[in-house]
Structure formats: structure tokens, C-alpha cells
Amino acid sequence: MLSLQGAMRRTRLRVVIFQEGDWLCAQCLDYDIATQAKSLEDLRYDLERLMVGHIAISLKHGIKPFRHLQPAPEKYWDMFRRSKIALPPQTFGLRVAKRGVKLPSPEIRVAPLAA
């Protein structure tokens, strides 16, 4: 059986947050996982739920989490690189330890608004 600690040892988590209309969006870069919500707190919760769900299902089937996920499209990497606003992990940190899953501290940046 695959252990959670072994599966998550080298996992990196970079996220870009941006606004699309009335929605806040979070796009993981290392793994093409995304969500959207109306508030920052709901966005954090939804992203946390997606990550934990993916990990739980992967481990249940003996698959290393994120193994089969491709990186996000290049346009999101560009948004991340152009961003000058980094959120401290405690501001938007994924608090999943209480659910028995410990993710690495995410590197989160807010994308500049499109002109």
C-alpha cells in the first residue's frame, strides 16, 4: 500500500489566483487542477477539498497522488511569473492536516488584472 508521507514527499504546489468577472479563480500550476468561488475563503475551501479528494481517491487505488495530472497550460504559468503579489501560506494556506492529509506549503500568487 502506498503511504501518504511517501506520496507527498516531493510534491510541489504553486497556485495562481485571478479574477474572471465576478469569480475568483485558483489554478494549480504543477497539476492542472482549478476551481472558482465568489470569496477568497470559499476559494481556499474548494481548492482544499479538490486536493484532499484527489489524494484520497489516488491512495485508495494505490496510485501516487498527482501522478497522472499534467501541468497547467502555459498562460497560467505566465500569470504566475508576472505576479508581484505573493500571499503568505497562512493567508491562503490549505488547512488539510485536520483531515489526515498534509500538503506542502503552497506558493500562491495573485495575478495582475488583465488590461
Image (spheres, rainbow, N blue to C red):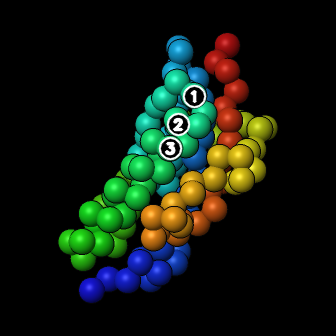
Residue of label 1: 39
The image shows residue 114 at horizontal and vertical percentages of 64, 18
Q: Amino acid at mark 1?
A: Ser
Dot 1 crowding, Cα within 10 Å, few <14, some 14–19, many 20+: few
Residue of label 3: 45
Helix, strand or loop status at disc 2: helix
Of residues 104 and 12, the one nearer the viewer is 104
Residues at discs 3 and 2 in contact (Cβ within 8 Å): yes
Name the side, left or right, on which 59 lies relative to 91: left
Residues at discs 1 and 2 in contact (Cβ within 8 Å): yes
Image mark for residue 23: none
The image shows residue 87 at horizontal and vertical percentages of 73, 45
Of residues 67 and 54, the one nearer the viewer is 54
29 in relation to 38, above or below: below
The image shows residue 51 at horizontal and vertical percentages of 42, 55
Q: Amino acid at mark 3?
A: Tyr
Disc 3/disc 2 C-alpha distance (Å): 5 Å
What's the residue at 46%, 68% (across, down)?
101
User: Would residue 56 be visible to someone looking at this image?
Assistant: yes
Image mark for residue 43: 2
What's the residue at 58%, 46% (across, down)?
15
Disc 1/disc 3 C-alpha distance (Å): 10 Å
